[in-house]
């Protein structure tokens, strides 16, 4: 099984829309995906292809601030279709995201995950991510 990771392209918008629904249970149109890929300059979307079939995706939100000379990024989404889980799709996606962050000289890559999401927590531990000690506060929702 060959896994190929690349940045998402507008031509794959319907597939991304379908995967987003599988993952988030939120229906967005292919038109919305195209618009987002073209206009949302802070978000980078990576896709995993297995034998030219869309197998998963990962998103990072790049954050620039006048307070710091370098940007950082948050891994906001990562998803692999059930039939491709256990074959390295998520690992390949995360490794490509890390590589992208290193090449672009980002200061930090961070993420949030539920303490009960065993699969995700194991993935990030196995990839040498370190558990932080940050409280997360929410407003507006």
Image (cartoon, grey):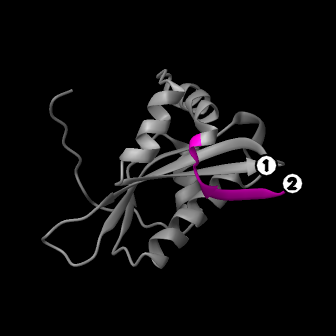
Front tag of 1 and 2? 1
- Give above or below for 128 relative to 61: below
Q: Position of residue 35 (x, y in %)?
A: 43, 37
Specify whether residue 77 is painted magenta.
no
Q: Residue at x 80, y 47 (%)?
A: 52
- Give above or below for 129 relative to 51: below
- In magenta, the rendered stretch is 1-10
How far apart, in angstroms, are the residues tagged by discs 1 and 2? 7 Å
Q: Position of residue 101 (x, y in %)?
A: 45, 70
Compare residues 21 and 12 and report the one nearer the observer: 12
Q: Which mark is residue 1?
A: 2
Residue annotated with mark 1? 50
Q: Residue at x 13, y 71 (%)?
A: 67
Compare residues 5 and 87 and report the one nearer the observer: 5
- Give above or below for 33 relative to 102: above
Specify whether residue 3 is painted magenta.
yes
Residue count near mark 1 (Cα–Cα under 10 Å), binned few <14, some 14–19, many ≥20? some
Q: Position of residue 110 (x, y in %)?
A: 38, 61
Image-based side of 133 in relation to 29, left or right = left
- Label 1 close to label 2 by CB (< 8 Å): yes
- Give above or below for 84 relative to 19: below
Residue count near mark 2 (Cα–Cα under 10 Å), binned few <14, some 14–19, many ≥20? few
Q: Which mark is residue 3?
A: none
């Amino acid at each position: 099984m060959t896994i190929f990771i690349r940045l998402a392209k507008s031509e794959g918008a319907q597939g991304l829309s379908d995967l987003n629904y599988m993952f988030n249970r939120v229906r967005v149109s292919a038109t919305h995906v195209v618009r987002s890929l073209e206009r949302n300059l802070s978000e980078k979307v990576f896709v995993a292809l297995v034998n030219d079939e869309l197998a998963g995706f990962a998103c990072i939100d790049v954050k620039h601030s006048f307070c710091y000379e370098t940007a950082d990024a948050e891994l906001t989404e990562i998803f692999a279709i059930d039939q491709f889980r256990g074959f390295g799709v998520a690992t390949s996606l995360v490794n490509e995201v890390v590589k992208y962050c290193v090449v672009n000289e980002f200061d930090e890559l961070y993420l949030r995950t539920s303490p009960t999401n065993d699969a995700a927590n194991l993935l990030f531990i196995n990839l040498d991510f370190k558990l932080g000690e940050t409280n997360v506060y929410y407003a507006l929702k």
